Image (cartoon, rainbow, N blue to C red):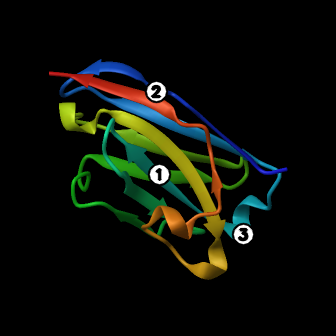
């Protein structure tokens, strides 16, 4: 059974930093591309960042230069380092996985495994 478990969310003031983690189990991690999405109240689920096998990563324009996605294939972990946080970054953040052979995806429908989410609240 595939499980993705996010952690590291919390409350922070604008300009601060948080590091989200996602622990994956029940899948051959190295065969999956990983993504981070977020959903604010009343809004759609938006792509944040995605990473393939190595360091190839893509980012939403709204987070470029502030967020960094990384993965540790030995530990089955994916991370999202978030710096210079803004109030508009407030959302529930989700980790997602899709087979690497499909490439990197930027839509929720591209991913077939999801975590339960972790809340990030940024106060201005």
Residue 18 x %, y %: 38, 30
* Identity of the residue drawn at 24% across and 34% down: 85
Q: Which residue is mark 1?
A: 36
Say whether marks 1 and 3 touch (CB < 8 Å): no
Q: What is the number of the mark on residue 15?
A: none
Residues at badges 3 and 2 in contact (C-beta under 8 Å)? no
Crowdedness of circle 2 by 10 Å Cα count: few (<14), some, many (20+)?
Answer: some
Camera-side mark, 3 or 2? 2
**Residue drawn at (51%, 44%), measured in percent from left and top?**
94
Which residue in the protein does label 3 denote? Answer: 31
Farthest left residue? 124
The local secondary structure at tag 1 comes to strand
Query: Does 90 appear above or below 44?
Result: above
Q: Is residue 38 above or below residue 91?
A: below
Q: Where 95 falls versus 59 (above or below)?
A: above
Q: Which residue appears at 27% of the width and 38% of the height?
A: 89
Q: Are marks 1 and 2 in contact (CB under 8 Å)?
A: no
* Residue 46 picture quarter: bottom left
State left or right for residue 65 relative to residue 78.
Answer: left
Label 2: state its secondary structure. loop
Residue 58 in the image: state x and y as whole percent. Answer: 38, 66
Disc 3 secondary structure class? helix
Q: CA separation, marks 1 and 2?
A: 13 Å
Q: Residue furthest front?
A: 42
35 lies left or right of 61: right
Give the mark nearest the N terminus, 1 or 3.
3
Quickly name the residue at label 2: 9
Task: Give neighbour class at mark 1: few <14, some 14-19, many 20+ (Cα, 10 Å).
Answer: many
Which sits in the foreground, 87 or 79? Answer: 87
Is residue 124 or residue 31 the one in the foreground? Answer: 124
**57 in relation to 16, above or below:** below
């Amino acid at each position: 059974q595939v499980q993705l478990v996010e952690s590291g969310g919390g409350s922070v003031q604008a300009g601060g930093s948080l590091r989200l983690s996602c622990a994956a189990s029940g899948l051959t991690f190295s065969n999956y591309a990983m993504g981070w999405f977020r959903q604010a109240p009343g809004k759609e689920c938006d792509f944040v960042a995605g990473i393939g096998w190595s360091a190839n990563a893509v980012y939403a324009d709204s987070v470029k230069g502030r967020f960094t996605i990384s993965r540790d294939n030995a530990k089955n972990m994916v991370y999202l380092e978030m710096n210079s946080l803004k109030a508009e970054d407030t959302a529930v953040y989700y980790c997602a996985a899709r087979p690497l052979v499909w490439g990197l995806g930027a839509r929720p429908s591209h991913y077939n495994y999801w975590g339960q989410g972790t809340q990030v609240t940024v106060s201005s």
